[in-house]
Amino acid sequence: MAFIKINQFNFTYPDRSEPAIRNLSFSIEKGQFVVLFGASGSGKSTLLKCLKREIQPHGKRAGDIIINGLDVNNSSGLSNEIGFVFQDPENQVVADDVLHEIVFGLENIGLTPNEMRSRVAEMVHFFGVEPLLHRKTHELSGGKKQQINLASVLVMQPDILLLDEPTAQLDPVNTREFFDILKRLNDEFGMTIIIAEHRLEEVFTLADKIVMLDKGEVQFEGTPEEVLVDVWNTKNKAYVPSIPSLFFSMGGKGKLPLTVKQGRDWTEQQTLIFKKETEKHPVTLGKEWIKAKNLFFRYDRKTEYVLKDLDFSLKKGEFFALLGGNGSGKSTLLKLIAGLVKPEQGKLLYNGIFTNTKKTNEIAKVVGYLPQNPKLFFIQDTVEKEIQETMLKWGIHDKSEVSQLIEELGISHVLSRHPYDLSGGELQKAALACLLIRKPQLLLLDEPTKGLDPISKESFSMIVNKLNGEGITILMSTHDIEFAAKYATKCGMMFQGNITSQGDPDTFFNGNFFYSTMIQRLFRHVPGSSLTTVEEVLKQCTPAAGR
């Protein structure tokens, strides 16, 4: 008998005519690692919440969800058996300091002090977070908060762990550490793990089963090797990660490679011939538009500087991707350039003019800023009203152009809904629409691909590339290595409040271990290679004759 059995399950939110989940049926065995993927709004988050009674959304449901022989809706005995980690770590933190955050759940179930001490000590050692125990939770980076959230869930010793895009706000190093922990929990403790993710490059390698949802229904289900073959033969090729995508594109035969190790074994069997790399035409840029000199900034006089003696310049027409760890100062730099905060020391110039001579509303006329939390963007009670208000504020009258943008972003179906009722990806796209319809001269995007599925990300890339081609300058902070390598004209690394290195994507990513694409890891052993994307490989590599 299956450990988790979902049978003809349907769920419809209040005041919605279309169900978020419809006729959903599949099963999960005990100890399996299952990945849910699909478009934003396809029902992944809704399904995960329906698996845990305490956080089930309001709405109309039909069908059955049976876990270990118990009906989820009619049993309170599953409460401590199921742990849940949310996408946004801020939504899960309840205590002021780390120790009380970890202990909070244990206190609620009435464990004895001795049992609590034992469980906490074990979990603290497992995660290696002893130095953080007496830190304030609001002082932690997003990565550390998410780690503490996971620890506070695991200390309850659940049999099932549900995770809703837990790495959306994590940098590549923290993401790798987070996935390593999940793998250990699955391998060493036999924990059943169900995770909804858009970062598919690494998580597919951990999965026993992957399930693709489309409009609340199962489109494909099976092992990664089975499902990716099916997905490749549909319009949803973008969901296939880089290494299997290269395999399919080159007409690969035999076992589908998922990891770098498997990919290297396959490429070595192909005896690939590497053509001489063609020189790339340099991007024509305008004059220096943004200039930062010796910037210092901190949020409080009692805390450390977030930005320290930072120098930075941005030329007109550049598409600059800013990378770095959680808490390295990327978002703060964007806020400074947007005029939302002022530097404590140093100079910031627009077109050679000091920002302290410009008012915030003057900067806003030419600068468009998308915050990391897109909820901060909305003040109206529907997406459509927000777009109309934006058009009115900025004197935009071309409704056909706005309609085209809405269509390109794929948000026509959410116009009548409240922004807070949208999925993470839908909310991100709605905020982007409000920002892009006024075509600012400088776009400041803080994690713009966070929460976007691969298809939406392709649509977004087409839009920003078009704007960049029209002369719009783009500065983007991101953890999305693949996106930055493929579309940015320049990349920079923030470390300890400064930009320590920068260059074109090929130069920037070459030689990195963690801040590198899967394709670069695949070909890093090839002398002189600076390949970073599937497209570059297909242009420069061919199998030897007879292969």
Image (cartoon, rainbow, N blue to C red):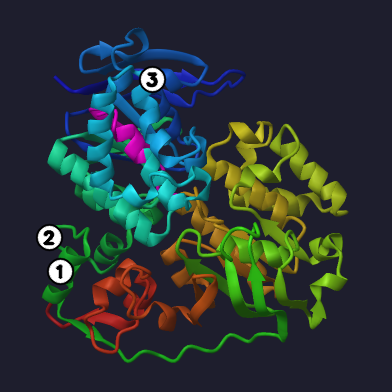
Comparing labels 1 and 2, the label whose residue is closer to the camera:
1
Whether residue 357 sits left or right of residue 538 in the image: it is right
Comparing labels 2 and 3, the label whose residue is closer to the camera:
3
Residue type pointed to by label 3: Asn
Q: Residues within 10 Å of mark 2 (few under 14, many from 20)?
A: few
Whether residue 197 sits left or right of residue 255 in the image: it is right
The reply to whether callout 2 and callout 3 are in contact (CB within 8 Å) is no
What residue is shown with label 3?
108
- In percent of the image, x 28 and y 47: which residue is there? 127
SS state under label 1: helix
Give how far apart the Cα atoms at labels 3 and 1 are: 52 Å
| Placement of 73 over or under 418, stated as above or below | above
Residue type pointed to by label 2: Gly
Q: Is residue 354 visible?
A: yes
What residue is shown with label 2?
254
Residue segment shown in magenta: 150-168
